[in-house]
Image: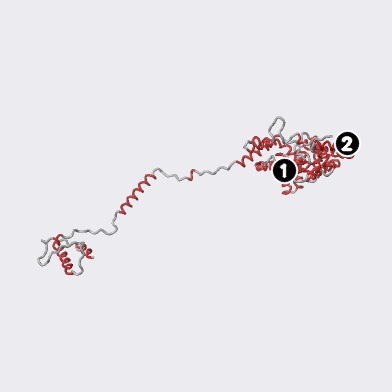
Amino acid sequence: MPGDFEQLHDQESVLLMYLAGELSDEEQARVHQMLEADVELKRLMERMEQSRATAYGALAALDAAEPLSPAAAEAGARLVIRSRLDARRPLPQPTAAPAERLRLGWWVYPVAVAAMVLIAFLAWLGNHTPSTPMVKLTPPPKAVNDPGVHTPDEVPVAVDPFVPIAPDAPEASKSLNDAAAQLASLSGSADDEIASPWVDMRR
Amino acid sequence: MGTASTGAAANNSGSAAPGDPATDEALVERLRAGATQAGEELVRRHYQPLMRYLQRLTGSGHLAEELHQQAWLSALEHLDRFDGGSVAGGFKAWLFRIATNKANDHWRSSGRERSAKNGMRLIADESWPTAEGRLENAEQAEKIRRAIDQLPESQKQVLMLRYYSNLKFVEIAQMLGCPLNTALGRMHKAMLKLKELMEIE
Protein backbone atom coordinates (compact mmCIF):
# COMPACT_ATOMS: atom_id res chain seq x y z
CA MET A 1 0.00 0.00 0.00
CA PRO A 2 1.63 3.28 -1.01
CA GLY A 3 2.49 5.46 1.92
CA ASP A 4 2.59 2.70 4.53
CA PHE A 5 6.29 2.18 4.05
CA GLU A 6 7.07 5.74 5.06
CA GLN A 7 5.03 5.35 8.22
CA LEU A 8 7.02 2.38 9.49
CA HIS A 9 9.48 3.39 12.16
CA ASP A 10 11.57 0.30 12.62
CA GLN A 11 12.94 -2.63 10.68
CA GLU A 12 10.65 -5.12 12.37
CA SER A 13 7.56 -3.30 11.19
CA VAL A 14 8.88 -3.11 7.65
CA LEU A 15 9.71 -6.79 7.65
CA LEU A 16 6.33 -7.74 9.09
CA MET A 17 4.59 -5.85 6.32
CA TYR A 18 6.94 -7.46 3.83
CA LEU A 19 6.24 -10.95 5.18
CA ALA A 20 2.53 -10.27 5.11
CA GLY A 21 2.74 -9.10 1.52
CA GLU A 22 1.01 -5.85 2.39
CA LEU A 23 3.50 -3.51 0.78
CA SER A 24 3.14 -2.25 -2.73
CA ASP A 25 5.04 -4.01 -5.50
CA GLU A 26 7.55 -1.21 -5.59
CA GLU A 27 8.10 -1.35 -1.84
CA GLN A 28 8.31 -5.13 -1.87
CA ALA A 29 11.08 -4.91 -4.46
CA ARG A 30 12.84 -2.26 -2.47
CA VAL A 31 12.84 -4.36 0.73
CA HIS A 32 13.97 -7.36 -1.27
CA GLN A 33 17.01 -5.40 -2.44
CA MET A 34 17.75 -4.30 1.12
CA LEU A 35 17.61 -7.89 2.31
CA GLU A 36 20.00 -8.96 -0.40
CA ALA A 37 22.40 -6.21 0.57
CA ASP A 38 22.17 -6.44 4.37
CA VAL A 39 22.97 -9.80 5.97
CA GLU A 40 21.93 -8.73 9.45
CA LEU A 41 18.59 -7.57 8.17
CA LYS A 42 18.13 -10.86 6.41
CA ARG A 43 18.89 -12.79 9.65
CA LEU A 44 16.38 -10.63 11.49
CA MET A 45 13.78 -11.42 8.92
CA GLU A 46 14.50 -15.13 9.17
CA ARG A 47 14.08 -14.98 12.96
CA MET A 48 10.81 -13.17 12.55
CA GLU A 49 9.66 -15.71 10.02
CA GLN A 50 10.54 -18.48 12.45
CA SER A 51 8.67 -16.76 15.27
CA ARG A 52 5.66 -16.36 13.09
CA ALA A 53 5.79 -20.01 12.06
CA THR A 54 6.03 -21.06 15.69
CA ALA A 55 3.08 -18.89 16.72
CA TYR A 56 0.91 -19.88 13.81
CA GLY A 57 1.91 -23.51 14.21
CA ALA A 58 0.91 -23.44 17.86
CA LEU A 59 -2.44 -21.95 17.02
CA ALA A 60 -2.98 -24.49 14.25
CA ALA A 61 -2.13 -27.33 16.63
CA LEU A 62 -4.54 -25.96 19.19
CA ASP A 63 -7.28 -25.68 16.59
CA ALA A 64 -6.66 -29.24 15.49
CA ALA A 65 -6.89 -30.42 19.10
CA GLU A 66 -10.21 -28.63 19.52
CA PRO A 67 -12.32 -29.43 16.49
CA LEU A 68 -15.35 -27.29 15.94
CA SER A 69 -18.50 -29.18 15.20
CA PRO A 70 -20.13 -28.36 11.85
CA ALA A 71 -23.46 -29.03 13.51
CA ALA A 72 -22.66 -26.30 16.02
CA ALA A 73 -22.13 -23.89 13.15
CA GLU A 74 -25.50 -24.81 11.65
CA ALA A 75 -27.20 -24.56 15.01
CA GLY A 76 -25.54 -21.22 15.64
CA ALA A 77 -26.65 -19.90 12.27
CA ARG A 78 -30.24 -20.99 12.81
CA LEU A 79 -30.31 -19.60 16.33
CA VAL A 80 -28.90 -16.26 15.32
CA ILE A 81 -31.21 -15.84 12.36
CA ARG A 82 -34.23 -16.97 14.33
CA SER A 83 -33.40 -14.51 17.07
CA ARG A 84 -33.10 -11.80 14.47
CA LEU A 85 -36.46 -12.65 12.95
CA ASP A 86 -38.11 -12.77 16.36
CA ALA A 87 -36.72 -9.36 17.15
CA ARG A 88 -38.11 -7.90 13.93
CA ARG A 89 -41.51 -9.58 14.11
CA PRO A 90 -44.10 -7.37 15.78
CA LEU A 91 -45.65 -8.78 18.85
CA PRO A 92 -49.21 -10.09 18.36
CA GLN A 93 -51.82 -7.64 19.48
CA PRO A 94 -54.11 -8.88 22.21
CA THR A 95 -57.63 -9.58 20.94
CA ALA A 96 -60.79 -8.88 22.90
CA ALA A 97 -62.10 -11.95 24.62
CA PRO A 98 -65.48 -12.94 23.17
CA ALA A 99 -66.77 -13.76 26.63
CA GLU A 100 -66.43 -10.12 27.60
CA ARG A 101 -69.00 -8.99 25.04
CA LEU A 102 -72.58 -8.32 26.34
CA ARG A 103 -75.01 -10.94 25.07
CA LEU A 104 -78.76 -10.21 25.34
CA GLY A 105 -81.72 -12.52 24.82
CA TRP A 106 -83.92 -12.11 21.74
CA TRP A 107 -86.88 -11.06 23.87
CA VAL A 108 -85.07 -7.99 25.16
CA TYR A 109 -85.47 -6.10 21.93
CA PRO A 110 -89.32 -6.22 21.57
CA VAL A 111 -89.65 -5.45 25.26
CA ALA A 112 -87.43 -2.44 24.85
CA VAL A 113 -89.51 -1.22 21.86
CA ALA A 114 -92.75 -1.63 23.84
CA ALA A 115 -91.26 0.27 26.75
CA MET A 116 -90.21 3.09 24.47
CA VAL A 117 -93.73 3.29 22.95
CA LEU A 118 -95.27 3.39 26.40
CA ILE A 119 -92.93 6.12 27.54
CA ALA A 120 -93.69 8.14 24.40
CA PHE A 121 -97.42 7.79 24.98
CA LEU A 122 -97.14 8.88 28.59
CA ALA A 123 -95.07 11.85 27.57
CA TRP A 124 -97.67 12.83 24.97
CA LEU A 125 -100.44 12.46 27.48
CA GLY A 126 -98.59 14.59 29.96
CA ASN A 127 -98.19 17.39 27.44
CA HIS A 128 -101.91 17.46 26.71
CA THR A 129 -103.11 17.58 30.32
CA PRO A 130 -104.14 21.18 31.43
CA SER A 131 -102.01 22.53 34.12
CA THR A 132 -104.87 24.47 35.78
CA PRO A 133 -107.80 22.66 37.31
CA MET A 134 -110.71 22.27 34.94
CA VAL A 135 -113.61 24.57 35.65
CA LYS A 136 -117.01 23.62 34.53
CA LEU A 137 -118.19 26.59 32.58
CA THR A 138 -121.88 26.93 32.19
CA PRO A 139 -123.34 29.16 29.60
CA PRO A 140 -124.38 32.53 30.87
CA PRO A 141 -127.87 32.45 32.23
CA LYS A 142 -130.25 33.23 29.51
CA ALA A 143 -132.51 34.70 32.05
CA VAL A 144 -130.37 37.75 32.41
CA ASN A 145 -130.63 38.69 28.78
CA ASP A 146 -134.07 37.30 28.44
CA PRO A 147 -136.47 40.17 28.65
CA GLY A 148 -139.23 37.80 29.65
CA VAL A 149 -137.56 36.66 32.79
CA HIS A 150 -137.27 39.37 35.22
CA THR A 151 -139.14 40.84 38.08
CA PRO A 152 -141.22 43.83 37.46
CA ASP A 153 -139.14 46.13 39.64
CA GLU A 154 -135.87 45.30 37.90
CA VAL A 155 -134.66 46.70 34.71
CA PRO A 156 -133.17 44.14 32.35
CA VAL A 157 -129.61 44.95 31.48
CA ALA A 158 -127.84 43.69 28.44
CA VAL A 159 -124.59 42.27 29.80
CA ASP A 160 -121.60 41.87 27.56
CA PRO A 161 -118.91 40.00 29.50
CA PHE A 162 -116.15 41.69 27.53
CA VAL A 163 -117.28 45.19 28.29
CA PRO A 164 -115.58 46.52 31.39
CA ILE A 165 -117.79 47.58 34.08
CA ALA A 166 -117.62 51.19 34.83
CA PRO A 167 -116.45 51.86 38.37
CA ASP A 168 -119.07 54.51 38.72
CA ALA A 169 -121.89 52.04 38.30
CA PRO A 170 -121.95 50.15 41.59
CA GLU A 171 -125.65 50.04 41.59
CA ALA A 172 -125.79 48.28 38.27
CA SER A 173 -123.26 45.71 39.42
CA LYS A 174 -125.15 45.05 42.56
CA SER A 175 -128.36 44.58 40.71
CA LEU A 176 -126.66 42.21 38.34
CA ASN A 177 -125.47 40.01 41.14
CA ASP A 178 -128.85 40.02 42.67
CA ALA A 179 -130.39 38.99 39.41
CA ALA A 180 -127.97 36.11 39.09
CA ALA A 181 -128.74 34.87 42.55
CA GLN A 182 -132.40 35.13 41.89
CA LEU A 183 -132.06 33.23 38.66
CA ALA A 184 -130.24 30.44 40.39
CA SER A 185 -132.90 30.08 42.95
CA LEU A 186 -135.58 30.06 40.30
CA SER A 187 -133.98 27.45 38.08
CA GLY A 188 -133.68 25.06 41.04
CA SER A 189 -130.10 24.16 40.33
CA ALA A 190 -128.34 25.38 43.36
CA ASP A 191 -124.96 25.12 41.79
CA ASP A 192 -122.40 27.06 43.68
CA GLU A 193 -120.33 27.57 40.61
CA ILE A 194 -122.97 29.53 38.78
CA ALA A 195 -121.97 32.81 40.25
CA SER A 196 -118.30 32.21 40.02
CA PRO A 197 -117.82 33.13 36.37
CA TRP A 198 -119.37 36.43 37.00
CA VAL A 199 -117.16 37.14 39.90
CA ASP A 200 -114.10 36.21 37.87
CA MET A 201 -115.16 38.45 35.07
CA ARG A 202 -115.43 41.42 37.24
CA ARG A 203 -111.96 40.92 38.53
CA MET B 1 11.06 -15.84 1.21
CA GLY B 2 7.49 -16.30 2.17
CA THR B 3 5.30 -13.32 1.76
CA ALA B 4 1.90 -14.96 1.76
CA SER B 5 -0.22 -14.92 4.87
CA THR B 6 -0.46 -18.23 6.64
CA GLY B 7 -3.38 -17.54 8.93
CA ALA B 8 -6.13 -20.03 9.48
CA ALA B 9 -8.53 -17.59 7.93
CA ALA B 10 -6.81 -18.08 4.60
CA ASN B 11 -8.87 -21.23 4.24
CA ASN B 12 -11.93 -19.65 5.78
CA SER B 13 -11.88 -16.33 4.13
CA GLY B 14 -14.70 -13.98 4.84
CA SER B 15 -14.96 -13.13 1.18
CA ALA B 16 -16.74 -15.21 -1.39
CA ALA B 17 -15.43 -18.68 -2.04
CA PRO B 18 -14.53 -19.74 -5.59
CA GLY B 19 -17.70 -20.53 -7.49
CA ASP B 20 -19.76 -18.45 -5.10
CA PRO B 21 -20.13 -14.95 -6.50
CA ALA B 22 -21.82 -13.56 -3.43
CA THR B 23 -19.54 -11.31 -1.42
CA ASP B 24 -20.18 -10.51 2.21
CA GLU B 25 -21.51 -7.12 1.25
CA ALA B 26 -23.90 -8.66 -1.28
CA LEU B 27 -25.15 -11.08 1.35
CA VAL B 28 -25.63 -8.19 3.75
CA GLU B 29 -27.75 -6.39 1.18
CA ARG B 30 -29.85 -9.50 0.64
CA LEU B 31 -30.23 -9.93 4.38
CA ARG B 32 -31.36 -6.34 4.70
CA ALA B 33 -34.00 -7.08 2.09
CA GLY B 34 -35.28 -9.91 4.26
CA ALA B 35 -33.50 -12.96 2.83
CA THR B 36 -32.71 -15.00 5.90
CA GLN B 37 -30.76 -17.52 3.85
CA ALA B 38 -28.19 -14.82 3.17
CA GLY B 39 -27.85 -14.32 6.91
CA GLU B 40 -27.37 -18.02 7.50
CA GLU B 41 -24.72 -18.07 4.81
CA LEU B 42 -22.91 -15.19 6.47
CA VAL B 43 -22.95 -16.92 9.85
CA ARG B 44 -21.68 -20.18 8.34
CA ARG B 45 -18.98 -18.40 6.37
CA HIS B 46 -17.51 -16.64 9.40
CA TYR B 47 -18.30 -19.25 12.04
CA GLN B 48 -14.94 -20.97 12.20
CA PRO B 49 -12.54 -17.98 12.18
CA LEU B 50 -14.73 -16.00 14.52
CA MET B 51 -15.22 -18.88 16.93
CA ARG B 52 -11.51 -19.66 16.93
CA TYR B 53 -10.64 -16.05 17.53
CA LEU B 54 -13.02 -15.86 20.48
CA GLN B 55 -11.78 -19.18 21.82
CA ARG B 56 -8.23 -17.89 21.88
CA LEU B 57 -9.20 -14.61 23.45
CA THR B 58 -11.36 -16.15 26.16
CA GLY B 59 -9.72 -19.55 26.61
CA SER B 60 -13.16 -21.13 26.82
CA GLY B 61 -15.19 -22.91 24.17
CA HIS B 62 -18.46 -22.25 25.97
CA LEU B 63 -17.71 -18.61 26.55
CA ALA B 64 -16.60 -18.24 22.95
CA GLU B 65 -19.90 -19.75 21.83
CA GLU B 66 -21.80 -17.29 23.98
CA LEU B 67 -19.79 -14.32 22.75
CA HIS B 68 -20.15 -15.55 19.18
CA GLN B 69 -23.90 -15.44 19.47
CA GLN B 70 -23.81 -12.07 21.19
CA ALA B 71 -21.59 -10.68 18.46
CA TRP B 72 -23.91 -11.91 15.74
CA LEU B 73 -27.02 -10.66 17.47
CA SER B 74 -25.39 -7.27 17.87
CA ALA B 75 -24.23 -7.27 14.26
CA LEU B 76 -27.70 -8.13 13.00
CA GLU B 77 -29.25 -5.59 15.31
CA HIS B 78 -27.09 -2.82 13.88
CA LEU B 79 -26.93 -4.12 10.35
CA ASP B 80 -28.52 -0.95 9.04
CA ARG B 81 -25.53 1.03 10.28
CA PHE B 82 -22.99 -1.04 8.39
CA ASP B 83 -21.56 0.82 5.43
CA GLY B 84 -19.36 -1.47 3.37
CA GLY B 85 -17.71 1.45 1.63
CA SER B 86 -16.52 3.20 4.76
CA VAL B 87 -15.27 0.26 6.81
CA ALA B 88 -11.76 -0.88 6.00
CA GLY B 89 -11.83 -4.65 5.69
CA GLY B 90 -15.53 -4.71 4.92
CA PHE B 91 -18.07 -6.79 6.77
CA LYS B 92 -15.52 -9.20 8.20
CA ALA B 93 -13.57 -6.41 9.89
CA TRP B 94 -16.81 -4.95 11.19
CA LEU B 95 -17.89 -8.33 12.57
CA PHE B 96 -14.54 -8.99 14.23
CA ARG B 97 -14.58 -5.56 15.76
CA ILE B 98 -17.96 -6.29 17.30
CA ALA B 99 -16.68 -9.63 18.59
CA THR B 100 -13.59 -7.94 20.03
CA ASN B 101 -15.77 -5.42 21.82
CA LYS B 102 -17.93 -8.21 23.19
CA ALA B 103 -14.86 -9.98 24.53
CA ASN B 104 -13.56 -6.76 26.07
CA ASP B 105 -16.94 -6.13 27.66
CA HIS B 106 -16.80 -9.60 29.11
CA TRP B 107 -13.38 -9.01 30.61
CA ARG B 108 -14.56 -5.81 32.13
CA SER B 109 -17.71 -7.31 33.61
CA SER B 110 -16.14 -10.46 35.01
CA GLY B 111 -12.68 -11.17 36.23
CA ARG B 112 -10.37 -12.43 33.57
CA GLU B 113 -8.70 -14.98 35.81
CA ARG B 114 -11.93 -16.63 36.76
CA SER B 115 -13.03 -16.93 33.15
CA ALA B 116 -9.68 -18.25 32.06
CA LYS B 117 -9.80 -20.85 34.82
CA ASN B 118 -13.26 -21.94 33.79
CA GLY B 119 -12.15 -22.02 30.18
CA MET B 120 -9.29 -24.32 31.01
CA ARG B 121 -11.58 -26.69 32.81
CA LEU B 122 -14.22 -26.70 30.08
CA ILE B 123 -11.74 -27.21 27.27
CA ALA B 124 -10.04 -30.01 29.15
CA ASP B 125 -13.39 -31.77 29.43
CA GLU B 126 -14.04 -31.75 25.67
CA SER B 127 -14.06 -35.05 23.85
CA TRP B 128 -10.99 -36.49 22.20
CA PRO B 129 -10.60 -39.36 19.70
CA THR B 130 -8.83 -41.85 21.99
CA ALA B 131 -7.65 -41.95 25.57
CA GLU B 132 -3.97 -41.97 24.58
CA GLY B 133 -4.38 -39.29 21.98
CA ARG B 134 -6.44 -37.31 24.44
CA LEU B 135 -3.66 -37.33 26.99
CA GLU B 136 -0.97 -36.41 24.45
CA ASN B 137 -3.02 -33.76 22.70
CA ALA B 138 -4.32 -32.43 25.96
CA GLU B 139 -0.81 -31.87 27.22
CA GLN B 140 0.22 -30.16 24.03
CA ALA B 141 -2.93 -28.06 23.93
CA GLU B 142 -2.54 -27.14 27.55
CA LYS B 143 1.02 -26.01 26.91
CA ILE B 144 -0.05 -23.79 24.05
CA ARG B 145 -2.95 -22.43 26.00
CA ARG B 146 -0.78 -21.51 28.92
CA ALA B 147 1.59 -19.71 26.57
CA ILE B 148 -1.23 -17.81 24.90
CA ASP B 149 -2.71 -16.97 28.25
CA GLN B 150 0.49 -15.27 29.32
CA LEU B 151 0.45 -12.89 26.39
CA PRO B 152 -0.61 -9.34 27.15
CA GLU B 153 -4.16 -8.75 26.00
CA SER B 154 -3.26 -6.09 23.44
CA GLN B 155 -0.63 -8.33 21.84
CA LYS B 156 -2.90 -11.33 21.87
CA GLN B 157 -5.69 -9.39 20.14
CA VAL B 158 -3.47 -8.38 17.24
CA LEU B 159 -2.00 -11.86 16.87
CA MET B 160 -5.40 -13.57 16.91
CA LEU B 161 -7.00 -11.01 14.63
CA ARG B 162 -4.20 -11.42 12.13
CA TYR B 163 -4.26 -15.20 12.29
CA TYR B 164 -7.99 -15.86 12.34
CA SER B 165 -9.50 -12.95 10.46
CA ASN B 166 -6.66 -12.58 7.96
CA LEU B 167 -7.31 -8.86 7.93
CA LYS B 168 -4.50 -6.59 6.82
CA PHE B 169 -2.45 -4.87 9.49
CA VAL B 170 -3.74 -1.54 8.32
CA GLU B 171 -7.31 -2.76 8.85
CA ILE B 172 -6.46 -4.26 12.24
CA ALA B 173 -4.89 -1.00 13.34
CA GLN B 174 -7.95 0.91 12.23
CA MET B 175 -10.22 -1.58 13.97
CA LEU B 176 -8.34 -1.33 17.24
CA GLY B 177 -7.96 2.42 16.93
CA CYS B 178 -4.19 2.47 17.11
CA PRO B 179 -1.39 3.54 14.72
CA LEU B 180 -0.11 1.02 12.23
CA ASN B 181 3.31 0.94 13.89
CA THR B 182 1.70 0.12 17.21
CA ALA B 183 -0.24 -2.79 15.77
CA LEU B 184 2.88 -4.12 14.04
CA GLY B 185 4.94 -3.72 17.20
CA ARG B 186 2.37 -5.67 19.20
CA MET B 187 2.33 -8.39 16.59
CA HIS B 188 6.09 -8.69 16.62
CA LYS B 189 6.25 -8.83 20.40
CA ALA B 190 3.44 -11.38 20.55
CA MET B 191 5.22 -13.71 18.15
CA LEU B 192 8.51 -13.43 20.00
CA LYS B 193 6.84 -13.93 23.36
CA LEU B 194 4.87 -16.94 22.22
CA LYS B 195 7.95 -18.56 20.71
CA GLU B 196 9.88 -17.92 23.88
CA LEU B 197 7.13 -19.34 26.07
CA MET B 198 6.79 -22.41 23.90
CA GLU B 199 10.51 -23.07 24.17
CA ILE B 200 10.44 -22.66 27.95
CA GLU B 201 7.49 -24.97 28.29
* Quarter of image, res A188: bottom left
Q: Amino acid at mark 2?
A: Glu
Query: Label 1: chain?
Result: B
Neighbour tally class for label 2: few under 14, some 14-19, many 20 plus, Cα within 10 Å: few
Task: Give A92 or A160, whichever is nearer the viewer.
Answer: A160
- The percent coordinates of residue B54 (x first, y second) are 74, 41
Determine which residue is flagged by label 1: B97
Residue A14 seen from this side: yes
Task: Give B158 or A191, whichever is nearer the viewer.
Answer: B158
Relative to A126, say whether A49 is above or below: above
* Quarter of image, res B17: top right
Neighbour tally class for label 1: few under 14, some 14-19, many 20 plus, Cα within 10 Å: some
Residue B147 seen from this side: no
Relative to A189, say whether A69 is above or below: above
Residue B43 placement, left or right of B113: left
Give residue A36's mark.
Answer: 2
Q: Secondary structure at mark 1?
A: helix
Task: Give A48 or A76, whichever is nearer the viewer.
Answer: A48
- The percent coordinates of residue B159 (x first, y second) are 79, 41
